[in-house]
Image (cartoon, grey):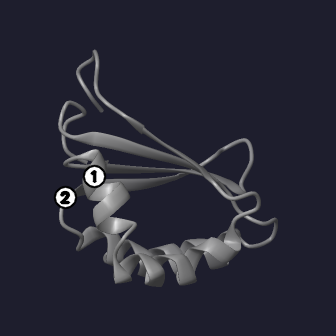
Amino acid sequence: MPPAQDGVLEIAMLQVRPGQAAAFEAAFAQAQTIIAGMPGYLGHELQRCLEHDHQYALLVRWRSLQDHTEGFCGSPQYQQWKALLHHFYDPFPTVLHYQHVLGKGL
């Protein structure tokens, strides 16, 4: 991912239905090619929780908030993303956006 001070960081906390982690990761491997091609996309990481193997953090860096909320979420590609991934979530993820304040970056 680019340095933390670039753009907006989307953080989605994902809870995958128990027993579906491997299938979710396989589906995400396909879905990541969709998001990577979107205007304003700068990078992403999917992190699995060490304490709870059905919980993930998805971090996506966008050039602007609108690139995510209007560009990606309003696109036909989002419908493909949704079809690949949304049925794995219970409950539906919390998604928030953050702007760099302090620190060197990860």
Structural crowding at the residue carrying mark 2, measured as other residues with C-alpha within 10 Å and reported as few (<14), some (14–19) or many (≥20): some
Taking depth in this image into account, of 73 and 104 the one nearest to the observer is 73
Q: Residues within 10 Å of mark 1 (few under 14, many from 20)?
A: few
**Residue 27, located in which quarter of the rendered image?**
bottom right
Q: Nearer the viewer, residue 21 or 4?
A: 4
**Disc 1 residue type (three-letter):** Gln
What residue appears at the point 33 percent right and 57 percent down from the top-left corner? 68
Vertical placement of 45 versus 81: above or below?
above
Secondary structure at badge 1 equals helix
- The C terminus - image quarter: top left
How many numbered callouts?
Answer: 2
Q: Position of residue 20 (x, y in %)?
A: 74, 73
Q: Please give the label number shown on residue 40.
A: 2
Q: Please state which of the two labelled residues, at mark 1 or mark 2, is closer to the viewer.
A: 1
- Choose between 16 and 25: the one closer to the eye: 16
* Residue 26 visible somewhere in the drawing: no
Label 1 close to label 2 by CB (< 8 Å): yes
Q: Is residue 106 left or right of residue 32?
A: left
Tell me the residue that label 1 is attached to. Answer: 66
Give the SS element for disc 2: loop
Mark nearer the N terminus (1 vs 2): 2
In the figure, residue 75 lies in which quadrant? bottom left
Q: What kind of residue is marked 2?
A: Gly
Work out which residue is located at the far top of the displayed protein and give it: 102
Q: Position of residue 46 (x, y in %)?
A: 47, 56
Residue 40: x and y in percent read: 19, 58
- Give the distance between the C-alpha atoms of the residues marked 1 and 2, in whole angstroms: 9 Å
Q: Residue furthest right?
A: 18
Q: Is residue 14 visible?
A: yes
Which one is nearer the viewer's eye here, 69 or 48?
69
Q: Residue at x 32, y 61 (%)?
A: 70
